[in-house]
Image (tube, rainbow, N blue to C red):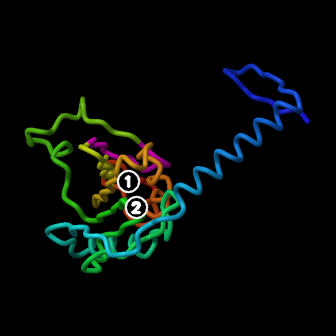
Amino acid sequence: MTLTVRRGGGRSAVGPRRAGLAAAALLLACQAALAGCSGGDATGPVEVAPPSPAPSGEADEVCRALADALPERVDGHDRRPTEGDSPYVAAWGDPAVTLRCGVGRPPEMTPGDPEYDPYTTDMMAVNEVAWLVDEEDGRVRFTTSESKYFVEVVVPDDYAPEVNPLLDLADPILATVPPDELHADPAAD
């Protein structure tokens, strides 16, 4: 058995003994990570403030569709009930990763707002969903940036790298939240 590792386009062959040790070390690391992440999630309701004002019209329909499409597990953590049982919020894990659908346009993305600065605002894309990134004390706030209605996900620093929960949320967001006019597919009209 030979394990091939690619480094910068080159190849390096590792013998069977080293491959076995590497595989065993990887297995132990994965088991330790899963043991640390899979258990111990709190089950009580999480306080997540619903967006204010509450979404209405098409935004309400989109957010309710997103709520129905959200996964039961995010980044290996179980979904938790939220206080007030709002259809516009969701939570996973302890401390909770939270999601709010139908939030207002972030000031960093609002022309005329003093915080608006398209040149220095941190943005990223994860699985075809574009996000505004706002690092706060003890957490990172991600807000969709190319969608007709905004979805906010707050990830505590305990989950570093904080981007990981977005991987599990990308598909439901893409399936239910339409892009804004600038990013809409012209062929869809």
Quadrant of the rendered structure where residue 118 is?
top left
Front residue of this view, candidates 157 and 135:
157
Q: For this view, does 11 lie left or right of residue 35?
A: right
Residue type marked 1: Ala
Residue 126 magenta: yes
Image quadrant containing the N terminus: top right
Point 28% across, 58% down: residue: 150
Q: What stretch is highlighted in magenta?
A: 125-135
Label 2, on which residue? 189
Residue type marked 2: Asp
Callout 2 secondary element = loop
The label shown at residue 173 is none
Dot 1 crowding, Cα within 10 Å, few <14, some 14–19, many 20+: some
Point 41% across, 74% down: residue: 43
Front residue of this view, candidates 15 and 145:
15
Q: Between label 1 and label 2, give the one nearer the viewer.
A: 1
The label shown at residue 184 is 1
Residue 145 magenta: no
Q: For this view, does 107 lie left or right of residue 75?
A: left
Q: For this view, does 135 lie left or right of residue 171?
A: left
Q: Are marks 1 and 2 in contact (CB under 8 Å)?
A: yes
Image x and y of residue 83, in percent: 26, 77
The residues tagged by marks 1 and 2 sit, at their Cα atoms, a distance apart of 9 Å
Front residue of this view, candidates 61 and 103:
103
Point 82% across, 30% down: residue: 18
Q: In this view, does 79 lie above or below 136?
A: below
Q: In this view, does 169 lie above or below 42?
A: above
Q: For this view, does 45 lie left or right of residue 105?
A: right
Point 19% across, 42% down: residue: 108
Secondary structure mostly taken by the magenta-highlighted segment of the chain:
strand
Q: In this view, does 41 lie above or below 85?
A: above
Callout 1 secondary element = loop
